Amino acid sequence: MTFRDEVFGTRSLRKPTIRGCPICLREDMEANLGQPLTKMTMRGHWQVRACSLCVDHQHSLVPLWEYNRPEERYDLSSRFEDIKDTVLAGELEQPRTTPSAYDIWLDTRLATGADETWLAGQSLDAATKFCTLLGAELLRLEDTSDLGEEAQLRRGQALGFNATRFGEDKIREALDALVSLASGHNDEPQKAFGKLYVELTQFYLAKEDFAPFRKIMRDCILDHWPIAPGETVLGYFQPTRKLHSVGTAAREAKIGPALLEQFLVDAGAITADDQRPVSRKTFDAVAYADLLAEVPTLVGPARMQHEMGATRMQFKSLAEDGVIKPRIQVATINFPWRISDGLALVEELLGIAQPVAPTNAKWEGIHQAKKRTGLRVGKIIEALRNGGLQLGHYSNIDGYAGFCVLKAEINSMRPPKLKVADHGLITAYTFGRSVGIRASGWFKKLAAEGHTPETLTPHPKGGPDQSYLSPDDITQFHKRFMTPATMEQKFGQHRKILLGKLRAAGVETFAPNGEDYGPVYLRNEVEAVLE
């Protein structure tokens, strides 16, 4: 139906109940009390369902009569005759209500067609229905328990209009606020948007004048829910995925969500303190598509060693020195390696290697050179890359294990020979006794993994370099670590008491990646409990 140059759905104008402002009708009658029926006038805008207030008199529109048959309902002379005495006596009048911005906007647009809001570009029927539906859902964000049914309707219309009048950005803010009401594991858009969502997906799905509102809500849904490609949302076909949740991504990658989440946190896709359920913990599907494609292809150290043609210790040395880096630095992940990284290293070294006969005694494997001299594999690889060393490859060994270096060139890289006594150095064994650890090899292992410094000196008979500690090495150890003996010295209690307190607080010995370095604890963890 067309009414005042606006197109309305029939139900927006025609209903069995006829409403009106009793003060308007009383004033009509008072203009000619002798013939009141000649002055009583039905205002058309009273019948617009979205209108609930007479702005002129600040009075709610009240039911005047109700008839199902239109010929009875619109027989105005008969109906006015029925209610004239009641109207004149003021029996239908109620307390005045201050008009909201919504009431004034609707009254002005119906009266003159003027509209200075964003809604000027929308049909009035769709605009009022959207404001009313949106406002009714926004009421869920407030405490309206003290409001009656009519007051809630009017409050909702005001909220909906204020969220809509300024355009798409403000509408999105309102919709985003409603999203917070659907934070559960299985909560879908209907939980967030309630009847507004139902109406837009059912009754108004094919209505062209509701298209702008459907699009705004569609965009909101795509920004908060992991909608799969090929799905239709509010009438719009979604060709690609915009968001993944941890759950949907894990299913596509065919790995566990807990494992995938560690990669996503490491990559910055989500934060470690995100408490949302995996179905709602979302991230940009396009930005992290490469990561999702890569994670299922990562392998463990055994597979990497096989693909590179390296032994377990050779690969371990490469990893410890950062020559090959895992895709993620998380100790609990058992498959962090990219095969392509290992193959790329082998291919790179083959490009600068020369063939070497397996019987040539002038050469030795890279790992053998490390064991003999104590030089880090990373330092040897760096020298190979910058041309400081020659690289060979044994003709009878495939892959990384076949690479070799000249012993003479490796010897030239060793530090100059030091006289231990002249530099205040002590042996690792002596230092171990000073901190209460008598087990052999613990400090050498700790230093070899890069957890604390050591001073290497050449072996007097050409064997592997020997491990000593300088005063600075000792200082650096104590800055980072404590042992039961040093705890006793600092805190003045028996070590059994101190270790009992640490166990109660969940503090364990320093053992990254499951390595055992003996009774060595991180100093900051100890002091946090014992001080």
Image: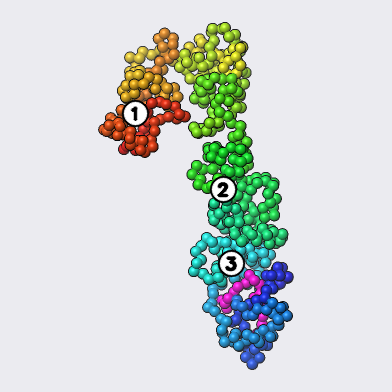
Q: Position of residue 470 (x, y in %)?
A: 36, 21
Q: Please name the amino acid that badge 3 sits on.
A: Gln
Instruction: Name the residue that disc number 2 marks.
Output: 280
User: Which of pointers 1 and 3 indicates the residue nearer the eye?
Assistant: 1
In this picture, residue 415 sits left or right of residue 268: left
Q: Could you say which quadrant of the image residue 23 lies in?
A: bottom right
For marks 1 and 3, the one nearer the N-term is: 3
Asked if the residue at tag 3 contacts the one at tag 2, i.e. Cβ–Cβ closer than 8 Å, the answer is: no
Asked if the residue at tag 2 contacts the one at tag 1, i.e. Cβ–Cβ closer than 8 Å, the answer is: no
Q: Quadrant of the N terminus?
A: bottom right
Instruction: Name the residue that disc number 1 marks.
Output: 483
Residue name at image x 37 percent, y 28 percent? 520
Residue name at image x 51 percent, y 62 percent? 142
Q: Could you say which quadrant of the image residue 32 lies in?
A: bottom right
Residue stretch in magenta: 40-60
Instruction: Name the residue that disc number 3 marks.
Output: 157
Label tally: 3
